[in-house]
Amino acid sequence: MAVSEAEAIIMDVLWRASPRSAEDILAEVGPQQGWQEGTVKSLLNRLLKKKAVKAERDGRRYLYAPRLTREQYVSQESKGLLDRLFGGRVAPLVAHFSEQRKLSKKDIAELKKLLQELDDEQP
Amino acid sequence: MAVSEAEAIIMDVLWRASPRSAEDILAEVGPQQGWQEGTVKSLLNRLLKKKAVKAERDGRRYLYAPRLTREQYVSQESKGLLDRLFGGRVAPLVAHFSEQRKLSKKDIAELKKLLQELDDEQP
DNA sequence: GCCTTTCGATTACGCGTGTAAACATAATGA
DNA sequence: TCATTATGTTTACACGCGTAATCGAAAGGC
C-alpha cells in the first residue's frame, strides 16, 4: 500500500536523519504541521505496518528509521505522474514547465550542463 | 477540492472530445476500466459538484464538458509534485530521471531543441 | 392514460486518511 | 509501594474515494 501524504512528511524527517525517537520526530514536525503526539504515533504505526519504516528498541522507547529510501519513494511518485500525464516521457514534462514559465535561469543552466554531460559520457 | 484519480479518467475522456453524453463516456471508458453505468454517473456528479465539468441539457439527458482544462489540471498536479519532491525546481527533477535512465534518445534530442529555442527567443 | 424504459439523483458501503482520544504498560520518583 | 510519567497500542470518527444499487421522474409505446 502506498505511503500517504501525511506519512510522507514523517518519512522526510527520517530521511534527513535517522534513527530517531517519536519524541524527536514530534519536536521537528509537530509545531510546523500542527500535529500532536497521537497523530505522529499513529502515522509511525501505519508506516510500520506498510514496512516503510523499521523500529529498533532503545530502552523504554523505539528509534525509527526508514526502510523505504527517499530515492525509491521519489521514483514511484514521479514515474506515476510522468506516466499518467505525459505518456511516460520526460521532454513533454519539461516543455510543460517551460510553457508555464517555471524554468529559472538556474534550471536552464543546469539542464544544459546535464545534457552536455550525457553527451560526454556516451561519445 | 481536488479531482481524484478515477475522476481524472473521466476528465480524460472529456478532454479528448466534448460535450458528450454519459452513455457515450461509459462506452469509451467502461469496458476498459471495468466500470458500469452507476459508477460513471457518480463520478460525473462528483465532478459537477467540484465544478470540474459542466452539463448542458440535451432533451432527456445531459451533455458533459470540461470546465477545468487539461492544462490547469496538469499544472496543478505537476507543480504539486515538483514542490513536494524537488524543492520546486525543474532541473533536479530531470536529473532524477536521468539517473534513473528514464531519458530516451528522443527525450534528449527534444530537450536540446527546447533549450536552443529558449536561447533564441531571449538573445 | 398506464406501463415500461431511460436517465439522472440519492443513498450505501467498505476502505484509507487525517487527526486524535483512550488505554495499556513499564519505569521512576516520593 | 503507589502514584505519576513516559511510551507505545488500540480504538474512534468524520470525510473522501471507488464502486455500485436503488429511487425517482420523464418520455414513449400501446
Image: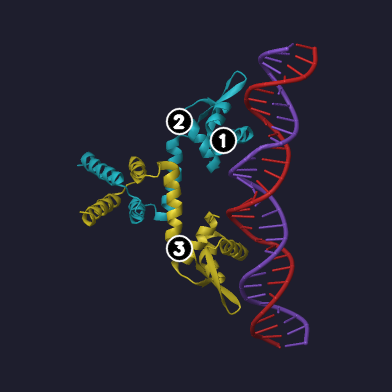
Chain colours: A cyan, B yellow, C purple, D red
Q: Nearer the viewer, mark 1 or mark 3?
A: 3
Quadrant of the rendered structure where residue C18 is? Answer: top right
Q: On the same chain: label 1 and label 3? A: no
Q: Quadrant of the C terminus of chain B?
A: bottom left
For the residue labelled by badge 1, is the local secondary structure a helix, a strand or a loop?
helix
Instruction: Estimate the spatial distance between the alpha carbons at disc 1 and disc 2, rounded to whole Å.
Output: 17 Å
Answer yes or no: is residue A2 visible. no
Q: Which mark is residue B91?
A: none
Looking at the picture, which amino acid does disc 1 mark? Leu
- Marks 2 and 3, how far apart at CA: 37 Å
Name the residue beneath numbered marker 1.
Answer: A47
Label 3: few (<14), some (14–19) or many (≥20) C-alpha neighbours in 10 Å: some
Which residue is found at the position 60% from the left and 18% from the top? A59
Q: Position of residue B67 (x, y in %)?
A: 49, 65
Q: Is residue A12 above or below residue A104?
A: above
- Direction from residue B88 to residue A55 in the image, left or right: right
Chain to which mark 1 belongs: A
Q: Residue at x 35, y 46 (%)?
A: B90
For the residues beneath circles 2 and 3, the answer to whether they share a chain is no
Apparent side of residue A26 relative to residue B111 in the rendered image (left or right): right
Q: Which residue is mark 3?
A: B69
Q: In this image, A24 relative to B71: left or right?
A: right
Which amino acid lies under the numbered mark 2 shown in the image of this protein? Answer: Arg
Horizontal and vertical percent for residue B50? 56, 60
